[in-house]
Amino acid sequence: MHSANHWGGSFEIQVDPITEEGQSRNMEEDRAMLLRQQLDETQQGWLLGPQDKKKKDKFVDLGCIICKRKVFKWVVLSLLAGFLLIGIPIVIVRHLPNHTEPMPPPDAYTVALHKALRFFNGQKSGRLPKSNGISWRGDSGLRDGSRLSDVKGGLVGGYYDAGDNIKFHFPMAFSMTLLSWSVIEYGHKYKAIGEYDHILDIIKWGTDYLLRTFNSSATTINKIYSQVGYARKGSTSPDDEHYCWQRPEDINYHREVLFSTSAPDLGSEVAAALAAASIVFHHEKTYSKKLVKAATTAFKFATAPSQRSPYSSGNDLIAPFYNSSGFWDEFIWGAAWMYYATGNYSYISFATNPELPNNANAFSNSLDLSVFSWDNKLPAAELLLSRFRIFLNPGYPYEDILKRYHATSDQNMCFLLKQFQFFKWTKGGLILLNHGRPQPLQYAVKAAFLASLYADYMNESNIPGWYCGSKFISSSALTHFATSQVNYILGKNPKNMSYVVGYGHKYPRHVHHRAASIPHNHKRYTCTGGWKWRDAKPGNPNTITGAMVGGPDRFDHFLDVRKNHNYSEPTLVANAGLVAALVALTGSGGQGIDRNTMFSTVQALFPPPHPPPSSWIHP
């Protein structure tokens, strides 16, 4: 049977003698050869181009990549050469002995700073931690304020002010503000010399106590505690200054607690201390917010219209020691710190309200008002607000008053320079900012801090100097002034002695300090039983390391006598100034200031716009 061929012609299949299967295989092979031959002769011509008579390239199959063998060899040789040139030297260097240059030894200011900070450990009241590091000090003042119904746990903690056993809250708060300011500006130096945690512990010990001196959890208060302990001249009953000479650990009598219902100065200073510390502890958000909230309450209390009488007014238990001469300077000082702590523009508006500097006589060019102290914050407040103008330049509506604060800061610095002879100086080189009265060193160190800080402000902003009248003064003149005063205190003086206990080979041994003067022999001495140690001729059995004493008189004379507190008594405010001056001057932890931390909460420099009319919101 034949199959039909639809393309025409017959369609027959003839079978050769070989098998049908073999013939079919031969036909397929022939057809394949024909196709390969056609591809070689035709399509390869136009697909691959003209035939190259050179040898064909050889390839290396790397699995996921196929590359020419020559390229492969070139890559391998390059990697090998790179290892020889780079890798081997690195291996050799890593195995060489380490000959890194050692860190340079700390400068004199750092050595003194380590000691000056220890003074605060020796002044602590309350239940002391084991890490306090002062072997002859123990728990004390654990019953302070125990009879107060509105203070849970009483007024335990804080710092004793000086060589006595009284806790004065006004200078204590000021000391914490000043220490916090030094950390905000020079925190990197504290870290570099290993004192950052220590200075934060010192500040927190103080601010934790200040939080107890009023109802810090409330939004409105009507009083603030101002002092624990008291003294009356000629007293024959137990007190903390004149009659009793006891270690604070031995006190067993009731200690009077004083409070004030009008305290614009104290309230503002407490607010400043808490606000400044909130910037220091910005990394501890919960604690920082707690400080800000309490500072807001304290400042609200201080600036209330009814608060127009200084906290010490008419109080003979305060006025002989820390009598406040006014409060307008504290208003400016406190408002500046509140602004930096909160970023709330209402505070900078308050600080630049013309009424405040006018009432404070800030622009009077008064020589006495240019001296920074626990009682006069004007020069520090003016510099603090000048910082705002120098680095952020906010302009209107703050510029007019900020410019005048800045100009006054310039004038204050001119007053410090010996060449202009505004203040008297001792022959040995100490400026007499308190006009030759006792305890001159505490004023000198705070002036040194402001001068060094202002020089750093100018250096940071590339300002070479300023004018004193028509004379241009380089910023280095301020650094020279600061170093001259601190060097005098550390031993470059006619006595060739250090006025910082424990620094150098020659320093005061008869420090007016109760705890340091009485042996730590586990015996309790009564109020009058301690008199023999007060009057003893040998030096103190305990060293109150880092304490800066009152200092010499206007003739560079100094008496190392325990009973004369004008020469030999240290104070919190004096040592706070010393710490600030030392950290500003030391080069061990680097140079310059931290420009930005102060402004960490400052956002909007101007008041927010008024809300649009309701017609803009509702049709």
Image (cartoon, rainbow, N blue to C red):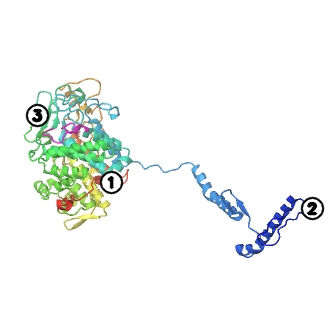
- For label 1, the SS is loop
Q: Quickly name the residue at label 3.
A: 233
Please report whichever mark, 2 or 1, sits nearer to the chain's N-terminal start: 2
Q: Which residues are magenta?
A: 208-224
Number of labels in the image equals: 3
201 is within the stretch colored magenta? no
Q: Magenta stretch: dominant SS?
A: loop
Q: Real-space Cα distance between discs 3 and 2?
A: 147 Å
The residues bearing labels 1 and 3 have C-alpha atoms spaced at a distance of: 46 Å
**Residue at mark 1:** 594
Question: Considering the image in quadrants, where does the N terminus appear?
Answer: bottom right
Within the image, what quadrant is residue 398 found in?
A: bottom left
Q: Is residue 340 visible?
A: yes
Q: Report which residue position mark 2 lands on.
A: 17
Residue 583 x %, y %: 31, 49
Which tag is nearer the camera, tag 1 or tag 3? 1
3D distance between C-alphas at marks 2 and 1: 106 Å
